[in-house]
Image: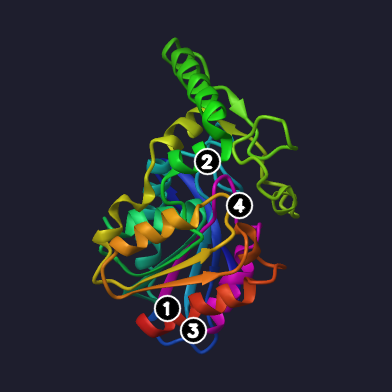
Amino acid sequence: MRTDVSFNSHGLTCRGWLYRPDNAPAKAPAIVMSHGFSCVKEQGLDDFAQVFCKRGFVVLAFDYRFLGSSDGEPRGRVIPQEQHDDLRAALDWLAAQPFVDAERIGLWGTSYSGGHALFFAGLDARVKAVVAQVPAIDLASSLSKLAGKEGFAGILASLAADHGCRSAGESSGEIAVTAPAGQACVLPGAADIWFKQDAPNWVNHTTLESVARMAEYVPGSLIELIAPRPLLVIAAQKDSLIPIADLRAAFARAGEPKTLKEYACTHFEVYPGEKFHDQAARDGADWFAKHLA
């Protein structure tokens, strides 16, 4: 059911898993999947992909460049525009497969890549249906609320200093993705247990340049451009990373057809092993089945 695959993106090899359903038609609908900030496919994507595959979809779940099993240095680099190009390359590769119906490809993203799904789908008409799970909406807003006014001012000062170092030819500094309370990291209080899953190729650091590009990124800014392609947004009402008010406001700007499903849970409770995972996977599969199959 699952095979290892790879494709080229700007001279680097991105690697992933391809799922093909049993008894699929000669040209089956397909879904492209990717994970959140710094995460790798081993951190729960298989569980979602298996659900989608059993519903009749070819599924490609892959690691962005600089992450997981994909190529690129420095490890842990996360630049939105580079990841958008990796999504384009993934679509190129998947659409070219003889067993895929290139007119029925959906895009699924979660957290940071959920934000990519909202932004990228507005610009690439090859995406015919979208599921954005607990998606990033406005990263500067999220970071400022996580860090507080003084903390966010300190982050901005660090980013400015790092830019000066890079302008002088030095490498970008590093920062932890998640860390114990009181230590500097990108996602304070972001459920350390989730990031400590059995994924040995995940690295708990990123570059300060990645944080700078994150702060400039507003994934929800193009949400109006997705319509008339169908959009499902899965939201966590108790989300400490993506404020529910920000998500509701962005969703209100989206065109039809669209659906917002709100769960009474935290950001990480939609993932495998958590209370709302089965519902999130089922709702995503139902949406794709309704609009692609």
Distance (Cα) linking label 3 and label 1: 10 Å
Mark 3 vs 2, N-terminal side: 3
Q: Point out the frontmost of discs 3 and 2.
A: 2
* Residue at image point 56% right, 73% down: 280
Considering the numbered disc 3 on the image, is that residue within a helix, a strand or a loop? loop
Please state the horizontal and vertical placement of residue 68, each as a whole percent of the image.
61, 47
Distance (Cα) linking label 4 and label 2: 26 Å
Q: Point out the frontmost of discs 4 and 2.
A: 2
Residue assigned mark 1: 288
Label of residue 56 in the image = 3
Distance (Cα) linking label 3 and label 4: 24 Å
Q: Which residues are magenta?
A: 29-55
CB under 8 Å between callouts 3 and 4? no
User: Callout 1, which amino acid?
Assistant: Phe
Residue 151 lies, with reference to residue 76, above or below; the image says above
Distance (Cα) linking label 4 and label 1: 23 Å
Residue assigned mark 2: 145
Residue assigned mark 4: 40
